[in-house]
Amino acid sequence: MKLINNLLIGIIPFFPKSFIKIFASPYIAGITDDEMLSTVANLNQEGYDVAIDILGEHVNTEKEATEITNRYSKLYDEISSRALNANLSIKLTHIGQDLGYDVVKNNLMILTEKAKEHKNFLRLDMENSPYTSETIKLYKEALELYDNVGIVLQAYMHRSISDMDSLSNASFNCRVCKGIYIENKDIVYDDYQKIRENYIELVKMGLERGSYIGIASHDEYLINYLYEWIKNNSIPKTQYEFQVLHGVPMKKTLEKLLKEGNKIRIYVPYGDNWYDYSVRRLKENPKMAGYIISNIVKRIFYFYK
Ligand SMILES: Cc1cc2nc3c(=O)[nH]c(=O)nc-3n(C[C@H](O)[C@H](O)[C@H](O)COP(=O)(O)OP(=O)(O)OC[C@H]3O[C@@H](n4cnc5c(N)ncnc54)[C@H](O)[C@@H]3O)c2cc1C
């Protein structure tokens, strides 16, 4: 499987962008703000909350970092004026984390202030391990300005349990995901089952301490296991939400969870950076190529989104 995935990644640059777009399009909610915002409105109508992400990361200049910050700022205005049920999920390297602490902090504070002005929420995505400690530090700085800011912990990281232990309390808002970046084996769990176990432990620890947890996964085993645990432990529905990436075909599961009164947030990435970003992610994590192919097969044979 690994060989096939790597082969697929190797041939991608030989296909025209328009062809690759056919495969990427279920996962990308448009190129322009208007395209994305109409996708968000449709998802809201179907009962889903949304987290919006402008595709991209690692900008090279302060000008680019400011432009992205301004685009995100305007999105808060759009969300309010269109009365959408959506918040923002940003990557700190996209607003200048590689350009120095002061640059990224300044841009983060602009967005935190804007989230506060609109009584909205700001999530800091978690990127690869060189950024973890600084992301947590910046998250704490943002919290001093406004308490409706959240972070992400990755179940494959050894350190995440200790991070959850030190961060979680009744006002902590954390997305738990498995982790997407390829990391050195010394700092992450490599075993699929071990990552699931750690994921479960992280979610339970957060919920038991009264934190708000975003259960971000498409792993049906994890979703079902945690949902049963939540029900058996009478965790209120106001203390958690399920989160999935736009376009991953799991309509039946999502509809069932919605019907039972659970909050589901769809992570909606968009923007003109879709090609470079998608190819980079695929190269970093060839497993994604296999996911995309199997999702196409699911769509064809099971007729679900
Ligand atoms: C809302 C959300 C936010 C995230 N934020 C972050 C973050 O901030 N930092 C970070 O490191 N990672 C993030 N991730 C990615 C996450 O860490 C995992 O890499 C990814 O979700 C795959 O793990 P899984 O739990 O879905 O389980 P897996 O076992 O990897 O996948 C289960 C099944 O889901 C499907 N699937 C999973 N991922 C994809 C995909 N990308 N495209 C198509 N199908 C897929 C496949 O059918 C697969 O068989 C986020 C994921 C979600 C859902």
Image (cartoon, rainbow, N blue to C red):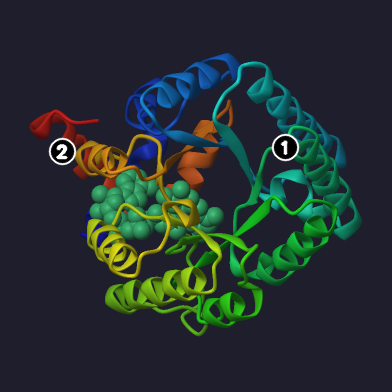
- Image quadrant containing the C terminus: top left
- Image quadrant containing the N terminus: bottom left
The residue under label 1 is: 119
Q: Is residue 70 above or below residue 32?
A: below
Identified at 36% across, 25% down, the residue is 46
The residue under label 2 is: 298
The residue at label 1 has a CB less than 8 Å from ligand 1: no
Identified at 86% across, 41% down, the residue is 62
The residue at label 2 has a CB less than 8 Å from ligand 1: yes
Camera-near label (2 vs 1) is: 1
Compare residues 229 and 57 and report the one nearer the observer: 229
Q: Is residue 283 visible?
A: no
Around disc 1, counting alpha carbons within 10 Å, would you say few (fewer than 14), some (14 to 19), or many (20 or more)? Answer: few
Q: In terms of sequence position, does the residue under pointer 2 or pointer 1 come before the other?
A: 1
Q: Amino acid at mark 2?
A: Lys
SS of the residue under disc 2: helix
255 relative position to 188: left or right: left
